[in-house]
Amino acid sequence: MTAPALNPPLNPALFHLDEAHLWVMHCAEGPVPRAAMRVVRAFMHKELQPWAMGFEEDFVGLPRSLRAEVATLLGGRAEDVSLTPTTSSGLVALAQGFPWQPGDEVLAPLGEFPSNVWPWLALAARGLSFREVPLWDGHGAGAEAWASTAPGPESDPEARLIAALGPRTRILSVSWVRFQDGLMLDLQRLGAACRERGVALVVDGIQGLGTVPLNLEGLSAMASGGYKGLLAPEGLGLLWTAPEFRARLAPTGSWLSVEQATDFSRPSTDLQRAWLTDGRALEPGGPNLLHSAALVESLRLLNETGIPAIQAHVAHLQGGLLDALQATPWAAEVARLRGLGAAGRLGSILSFHHGHHGPEAMERLLRSGYRQGIFASVREGYLRVAFHGFHTDHDVNRVAAWLGGAGAP
Ligand SMILES: Cc1ncc(COP(=O)(O)O)c(C=O)c1O
């Protein structure tokens, strides 16, 4: 029996969506609510006349409001939040600031999005090793990506990662929700195992934030951009660090990483200052005020709505789609994805594996969706359908008619 229709927790009327574009790919880029556009426009008016800008209200106030909204979203403290442009830049700040010894190692799952790879590989010349761990039997990536098998409900990726932690592993760095196969990892299980071994758990959170409630217990750091599930424009994100982990990192060294940096009654050239110990120590420099204005609005909307309500709604939509595709050539994928959902291993991305059909068939399938005004995405062997809190049962029916009608690729 199909579950009864639910009102979407995020009112679609708050967005600029239209019937010609069913956007089920916030896993690539999320739509921004109209409210964000309004505040950005208002802020740009101030930029036209700099005397309209307030030091306390804008330069100090906007980043402060943003850190507070981020803290609410994460269930953490504003002092532990750094405002960073992207996921990559957050992870780079950690990689560059960590007190490495030659021979140290970073461990990561195989097939991470490269923002969680290049920051570590960039330190190879300083003696840092980077080791990847396949998460299930037949798991492949890179040149093998399309030949990879898909994870099933019986997969135990955390066990494989924990077993792979070695004596020189300093950091385990994982995506919370993986970008291609959509698998969601159990961060608390990983965090507990890391803590026992003195390893820091670093998380790329971008594919989970905004659609899955977060528990920071056991994490050392989390980085994310703001432009996917967080529904803000590209260009501003966040880094959260646990205080004891942050204390081990070198500050980024921006002029705002030190105490009283904006107290202009004291010469800025006076270098007798202590480094800040809160999240601002890891920020890249002066705040991105325009983007802060937008991200604050998006986060306010998400926080007022509540991520648990969004998660429940997404699960309802996913269930509806899987039910509708049950008696179609997608049946095997439906069973696999249902199993992953029941095992608590799905975020907001339903990733349908291509089977043995290959990239061209998936591209044709994607294009047949575009012709019906349905915008999904394909990555590394998977067709990704990502629902958010503003999607409706009508949207599910459209995707079901497309995929059911087209059949498996
Ligand atoms: C898992 C994951 N991490 C990071 C990113 C983006 O990184 P950045 O915020 O550095 O652009 C993506 C984008 O697709 C992603 O899927």
Image (cartoon, rainbow, N blue to C red):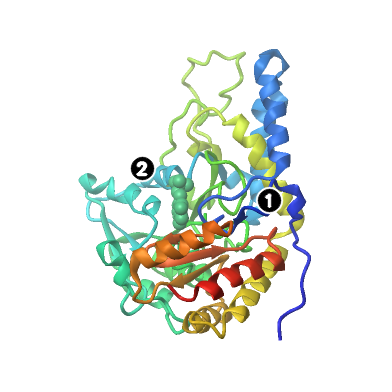
| Mark 1 Cα-neighbour bin, 10 Å: few <14, some 14–19, many ≥20 | few
Front residue (pair 53, 393): 393
Question: Is 347 above or below relative to 342?
Answer: above
Q: Which residue is mark 2?
A: 96
Q: Residue at x 43, y 67 (%)?
A: 382
Tell me which corner region of the image, top left, top right, bottom left or bottom right, holds residue 89: top left
- Name the quadrant of the C terminus: bottom left
Helix, strand or loop at mark 2: helix
Residues at badges 2 and 1 in contact (C-beta under 8 Å)? Answer: no
Sequence-wise, the earlier of marks 2 and 1 is: 1
| Residue 214 pos. (x, y %) | 60, 62
| Residue 365 pos. (x, y %) | 46, 65
Q: Residue at x 76, y 50 (%)?
A: 13
Tell me which corner region of the image, top left, top right, bottom left or bottom right, holds residue 289: top right
Q: Residue at x 60, y 67 (%)?
A: 399
Q: Amino acid at mark 1?
A: Asp
Question: Is 372 above or below relative to 325?
Answer: above
Q: Amino acid at mark 2?
A: Gln
| Residue 282 pos. (x, y %) | 48, 39
| Residue 22 pos. (x, y %) | 62, 57
Q: Which residue is mark 1?
A: 18
- Name the quadrant of the N terminus: bottom right
Question: Is 132 above or below relative to 20?
Answer: below
